[in-house]
Amino acid sequence: MSKLKIKGSGVLLDIEGTTSSISFVHDVMFPYARRELDRYLTENWDSPELADTCQVIAKDAGFDSLDDWSNATRDVEQLALVRDEVLRLMDGDVKATGLKQLQGLIWKAGFETGEMKAHVYDDVPPALEAWNQAGQDLRIYSSGSIVAQKLFFGHTIVGNLLHLFRGHYDTTIGSKKESASYERIAAAFELPPQEVTFVSDVPAELDAARDAGLRTALCKRPGNAEVPKDHGHTEISDFAQLELV
């Protein structure tokens, strides 16, 4: 098994297609959020958490606030506005910040009741443990909200892995395909960019990270999308191939 030597103190990981299977996210998590959407909105409409998330959804839709959005479409109730917009975003697999926040709120119930347990690949837990013992600073950068990330790693099929991570980032820090996002994350690590290694299954994300000065590794897992042969990043299929130097 060929190995990629990591020179540095920080490891930044994607989730879907990297630590966990794409099929779990698409076949379990997304359908759960869709199925529970109406119930969650109805039962929690007056909660502060949902109110804040709806404001973000309104801004993603191009309005200053939920009230402005509602005033622009006078015949539709606010709950119905949010519901229809969320379904539209889900249908288009849009990585909108408000949608991801709402999905995180809905998934919370599923994880906390035990109805859902997050999938992680077999090689992930031992690698995370070993890297922690070696003093590596491990963090997550995903399009899923920080709330969803913490729920995910707090309720996996092998138990709670959340304590192994020192930081979490989502699209509130910027797009995963823009180098400025990785510059901000490297600054949050308080490390030179070249001392942070980003692992993802998406070449465009890795390109942006490399442009910001980070080291990169393309994770190839069963079921991941095909990538161009000339993507220019070191490939791994198992976290054991990442060797700390």
Image (spheres, rainbow, N blue to C red):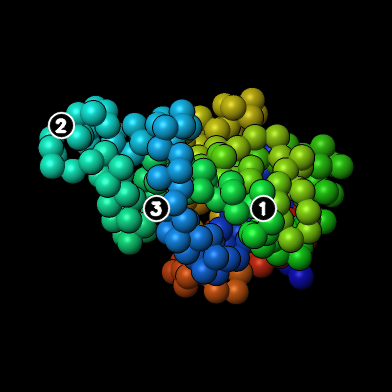
Question: Mark 1: which amino acid?
Answer: Thr
Question: Mark 3: which amino acid?
Answer: Asp
Taking the spot 60% from the left edge, 54% from the top edge, the residue there is 110
Q: Which mark is residue 223?
A: none
Taking the spot 47% from the left edge, 64% from the top edge, the residue there is 31
Taking the spot 34% from the left edge, 31% from the top edge, the residue there is 55
Estimate the spatial distance between the alpha carbons at disc 3 and disc 1, rounded to whole Å.
19 Å
In the displayed structure, 233 sits above or below 60; it is below
In the displayed structure, 220 sits above or below 214; it is below
In front here: 135 or 153? 153
| Residue 22 can be seen in this image | no
Tell whether 227 sits left or right of 186.
left
Estimate the spatial distance between the alpha carbons at disc 3 and disc 2, rounded to whole Å.
22 Å
| Residue ranking furthest to the front | 43
Tell whether 235 sits left or right of 34.
right
Q: Which residue is under mark 1?
A: 113
Estimate the spatial distance between the alpha carbons at disc 1 and disc 2, rounded to whole Å.
38 Å
Percent across and percent down for residue 20 are 63, 61
Contact? badges 1 and 2 (CB < 8 Å): no
Secondary element at tag 2: helix
Q: Which residue is under mark 2?
A: 71
Q: Which mark is residue 38?
A: 3
Question: Mark 2: which amino acid?
Answer: Asn
